[in-house]
Image (tube, grey):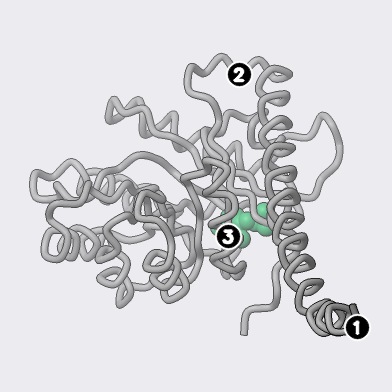
Amino acid sequence: MIRGGQRLIRFLPTYRTTQINRISTMTRKDELVTNYESILAQIRDAEAKYGINNKDQVMLLAVSKLKPASDVQLLYDHGIRHFGENYVQELIEKSIALPKDINWHFIGGLQSNKCKDLAKIPNLYAVETVDSLKKANKLNEARSKYNPDSPPINCFIQINTSNEEQKSGLSDESEIFEIIEFFFNSNTKNINLIGLMTIGSWETSHNNDPDYINLDFENLVNWKSKIDSKYNTNLKLSMGMSADFKQAIKQGTSEVRVGTDIFGVRPAKH
Ligand SMILES: *Cc1c(COP(=O)(O)O)cnc(C)c1O
């Protein structure tokens, strides 16, 4: 009796720690799944409310930057396959650690000297921040050199719709037309133009007036009309984040990029 009791006391702390770890992992999964499903439901409501009769539903891109790979794995286990990342090194590490059928979207500021490293990631699905012909060319060349058997990289051209100097993206018409024509060139088989992307200004994304029209989003929609009619394309739009995704749906986006509302507030980038 006494020996058994002693053993029980000795093992009790270990047993409790294991249970607590298991419970906290479960809770994080519940939290992420609940948040994700809540945003998805809000997206579907907004589509219905604003009469979006698009056959293709708005895509929810889960932005996992600065969040641990374990968070991505938990949502992957719930069936999510599209994730967005901003930093090349972090994306490389996650792409190695996580399942190979994840479709990664690079949505951070694109540097010419990082295009090669990005293109080497076999399951890099999209680069949403292409803002020069030179970078598009580097992505294409590196993809054909290092990953010729992977699908072409889907590209969005980033447009600077708010004319803020610190924002990347193109705003010059001739430059935009030049890069679009580059994608139609027969030598660019490893990159594929699929859409336009923008990040609106902070002010436009935090306006709570229900009748508000976000001028940055409107600007992107106008670029789409202009390009679609000139080149007979049907480009997708990637606009809208946690603060303004409903507004983006109202104005006709194809994809919203949501981080904070799914994963919670991010740690500071060091
Ligand atoms: C971080 C980021 C997001 C997600 O922003 P949240 O406000 O956290 O939803 C979307 N798009 C881009 C380009 C980002 O850098």
Q: Are marks 2 and 1 in contact (CB under 8 Å)?
A: no
Q: Is residue 254 left or right of residue 190?
A: right
Farthest residue toward the front?
1
* Mark positioned earlier in the residue sequence (1 or 3): 1
Residue drawn at (48%, 58%), measured in percent from left and top? 107
Q: Residues within 10 Å of mark 2 (few under 14, many from 20)?
A: some
- When the figure is inspected, residue 116 is found, relative to residue 36, above or below; the finding is below
Circle 3 is placed at which residue position?
A: 64
Mark 3 is surrounded, within 10 Å at the Cα level, by few (under 14), some (14 to 19) or many (20 or more) other residues, namely many
Provide the secondary structure element on which disc 2 rests: loop
- Total of numbered circles in the picture? 3
Q: Secondary structure at mark 3?
A: loop
Which residue is the site of mark 2? 52
Local secondary structure at mark 1: helix
Type of the residue with mark 3? Ser
Question: What whole-number distance in Å separates the C-alpha atoms at marks 2 and 1?
Answer: 71 Å
Q: Residue at x 50, y 52 (%)?
A: 83
Image quadrant containing the C terminus = bottom right
Q: Quadrant of residue 9?
A: bottom right
Mark closer to the observer (2, 3): 3
Is 23 situated left or right of 58 in this image? right
In the rendered image, residue 77, in percent from the top left (x then y), is placed at 54, 47
The residue beneath circle 1 is 2
Q: CA distance from mark 2 to mark 3?
A: 27 Å
Q: Which amino acid type is marked by label 2?
A: Ile
